[in-house]
């Protein structure tokens, strides 16, 4: 694993493997928007391709989505804003991202991913929020429901702001209809267990959210 980096600015964190061309296309799309890409890869082909796009690159064993998002946020120090991304998440309208995140210190930005309108699926983390909490996701989840868990906890604490002036395009396999690959099948196979963990964690608290304001943008 490579040493820590210390570069300020906006980053998107992508954990990926065995999808070299898909990962490359996503990384290049974000780089074209002047957004830094940090990636964690678990195969050589993807790693070698992404070396041409970003120096913020890590190589290791495949681990869960929450673990790798937390790891990348920790290893890349000095960032101001971190998008919890994926190798099927593209920028759509991010022109106001820079102006928005610095107006909301200590908050998580709930961005429109063009799929989910009731839960924050790819949170945008401000540095002050991260410094207060030290990690983003509960690592007991494999993939599914870690975002729901964050939504409930941060929403109750008044730490989320709805910022649908910023839009991503999530080309999820359930939307595109593409055949499931090995990683998609693993996500589907672990979904029931993640759901059980989520319900067990929140059974005493219920599922009531706090008030989530909408960012007043012009």
Image (tube, rainbow, N blue to C red):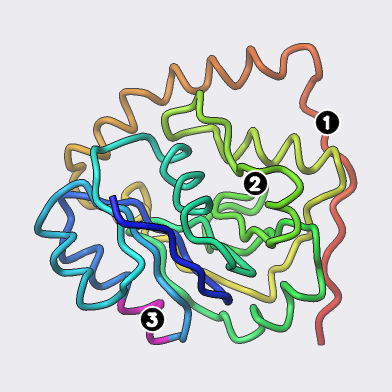
How crowded pointer 2 is (Cα within 10 Å; few <14, some 14-19, many 20+) is rated as some
Q: What number is the disc on residue 119? A: 2
Of mark 2 and mark 1, the one earlier in the sequence is 2
Residue at figure coordinates x 68%, y 58% from the top left: 110
Q: Are discs 2 and 1 less than 8 Å apart at CB?
A: no
Separation (CA) of disc 3 from disc 1: 38 Å
Residue at figure coordinates x 78%, y 53% from the top left: 160
- Quadrant where the C terminus is found in the figure: bottom right
Does the magenta segment cover residue 130? no
Image x and y of residue 21, in percent: 16, 66
Of mark 3 and mark 2, the one earlier in the sequence is 3
Image x and y of residue 105, in percent: 80, 65
Image x and y of residue 77, in percent: 54, 61
Q: Are discs 3 and 1 less than 8 Å apart at CB?
A: no
Say which element carries label 1. Answer: loop
Image x and y of residue 124, in percent: 62, 60
Say which element carries label 3. Answer: helix
- Mark 3, residue position: 31
Specify start and end residues of the magenta stretch as a single range: 28-32
How crowded pointer 3 is (Cα within 10 Å; few <14, some 14-19, many 20+) is rated as some
Q: Are discs 3 and 2 less than 8 Å apart at CB?
A: no
- Mark 1, residue position: 208
Separation (CA) of disc 2 from disc 1: 13 Å
Query: In the shown orientation, is residue 80 left or right of residue 70?
Result: right
Separation (CA) of disc 3 from disc 2: 26 Å
Q: What number is the disc on residue 118? A: none
Say which element carries label 2. Answer: loop
As drawn, the residue found furthest toward the front would be 3
Of mark 3 and mark 1, the one earlier in the sequence is 3
Q: Nearer the viewer, residue 195 or 114?
A: 195
Q: Nearer the viewer, residue 197 or 139?
A: 139
Residue at figure coordinates x 69%, y 62% from the top left: 126
């Amino acid at each position: 694993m490579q040493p820590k980096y210390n570069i300020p600015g906006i980053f998107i964190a992508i954990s990926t493997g065995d999808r070299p061309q898909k990962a490359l296309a996503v990384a290049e799309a974000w780089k074209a928007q002047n957004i830094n890409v940090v990636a964690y890869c678990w195969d050589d082909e993807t790693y070698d391709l992404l070396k041409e796009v970003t120096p913020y690159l890590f190589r290791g064993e495949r681990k869960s989505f929450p673990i790798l998002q937390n790891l990348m946020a920790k290893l890349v120090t000095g960032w101001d804003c971190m998008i919890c991304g994926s190798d099927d998440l593209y920028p759509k309208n991010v022109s106001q991202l820079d102006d928005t995140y610095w107006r909301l210190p200590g908050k998580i930005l709930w961005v429109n991913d063009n799929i989910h309108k009731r839960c924050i699926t790819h949170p945008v983390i401000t540095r002050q929020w991260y410094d207060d909490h030290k990690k983003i996701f509960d690592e007991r989840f494999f993939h599914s429901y870690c975002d729901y868990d964050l939504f409930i906890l941060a929403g109750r604490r008044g730490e989320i702001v709805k910022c649908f002036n910023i839009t991503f395009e999530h080309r999820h396999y359930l939307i595109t209809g593409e055949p499931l690959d090995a990683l998609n099948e693993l996500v589907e196979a672990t979904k029931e267990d993640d759901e059980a963990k989520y319900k067990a964690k929140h059974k005493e608290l219920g599922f009531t959210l706090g008030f989530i304001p909408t960012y007043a943008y012009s």
